[in-house]
């Protein structure tokens, strides 16, 4: 089985995407409920995906040639929605959908945890209980997401309307990374 340092490194690597997305969201949506919803859901999905990967990964890979394409498409759709939301006039901006609710939150949670699905497949090859590494990944992701929203909220004073463009660019970059890697 992996030692704790290896599990922590894997958890940190899995949480970078969540941090980046949380930073973009935190630029505009940074009330306590946003911290909680984003951190809880990202952490939950980062915990569940390795478990799902370990249990069903081999079966999924038989039917799906590349899970990265699915994650990329989800990120591109959300990035498009963020850019579209940033283009509207200031009077219309108060009706912009909160990305920490509904389908946007689910899409973001799935998209940022797709790497963890692959990690789950890899972790299934090691002897031992997958629950402990999955728990560490989830907890670290909660911390990274919380930090991302926090640092994003600090930057809102400097970025204003361009925060949504930044968030969209981050999502597009992550989506491209999924396609290239």
Image (tube, rainbow, N blue to C red):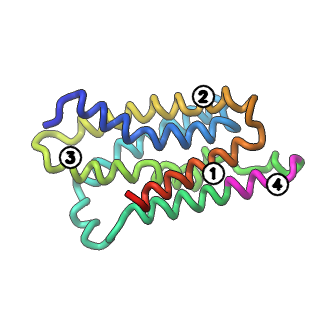
Check disc 4 and report the residue beneath it.
Answer: 88
Q: Say whether residue 15 is left or right of residue 27.
A: left
The earlier-in-sequence mark between 3 and 1 is: 3
Q: Which one is in front in this view, the residue at disc 4 or the one at disc 1? A: 1
Quarter of the image where the N terminus is located = top left
Check disc 3 and report the residue beneath it.
Answer: 123
The earlier-in-sequence mark between 2 and 4 is: 4
Q: Say whether residue 82 is left or right of residue 67.
A: right
Q: Say whether residue 167 is left or right of residue 10.
A: right
Q: What stretch is highlighted in magenta?
A: 82-90
Quarter of the image where the C terminus is located = bottom left
Residue appearing at x 41%, y 60% in the figure = 180
Placement of 41 over or under 81, stated as above or below: above
Q: Is residue 85 magenta?
A: yes
Check disc 2 and report the residue beneath it.
Answer: 151
The earlier-in-sequence mark between 4 and 3 is: 4
Placement of 75 over or under 61, stated as above or below: above
Q: Which one is in front in this view, the residue at disc 2 or the one at disc 3? A: 2
Disc 2 secondary structure class: helix
| Distance Cα–Cα, label 4 vs label 3 | 45 Å
| Distance Cα–Cα, label 2 vs label 4 | 25 Å
| Distance Cα–Cα, label 3 vs label 1 | 31 Å
The single residue placed furthest to the left in the displayed view is 127
The earlier-in-sequence mark between 2 and 3 is: 3
Task: Give the main secondary structure, helix, strand or loop, of the magenta stretch.
Answer: helix
Q: Does the magenta stretch include residue 138?
A: no
Q: Which mark is residue 168?
A: 1
Q: Position of residue 172 (x, y in %)?
A: 56, 55
| Distance Cα–Cα, label 1 vs label 2 | 17 Å
């Amino acid at each position: 089985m992996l030692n704790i340092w290896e599990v922590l490194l894997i958890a940190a690597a899995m949480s970078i995407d969540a941090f980046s997305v949380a930073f973009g969201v935190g630029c505009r949506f940074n009330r306590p409920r946003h911290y909680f919803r984003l951190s809880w859901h990202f952490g939950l999905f980062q915990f569940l995906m390795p478990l799902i990967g370990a249990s069903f990964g081999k079966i999924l890979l038989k039917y799906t040639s590349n899970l990265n394409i699915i994650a990329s498409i989800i990120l591109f759709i959300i990035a498009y929605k963020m850019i579209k939301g940033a283009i509207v006039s200031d009077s219309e901006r108060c009706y912009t959908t909160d990305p920490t609710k509904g389908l946007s939150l689910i899409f973001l949670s799935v998209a940022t945890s797709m790497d963890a699905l692959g990690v789950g497949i890899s972790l299934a090859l090691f002897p031992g209980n997958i629950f402990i590494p999955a728990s560490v990944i989830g907890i670290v992701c909660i911390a990274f997401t919380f930090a991302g929203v926090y640092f994003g909220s600090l930057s809102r004073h400097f970025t204003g309307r361009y925060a949504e463009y930044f968030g969209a660019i981050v999502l597009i970059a992550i989506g491209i990374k999924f396609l290239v890697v």
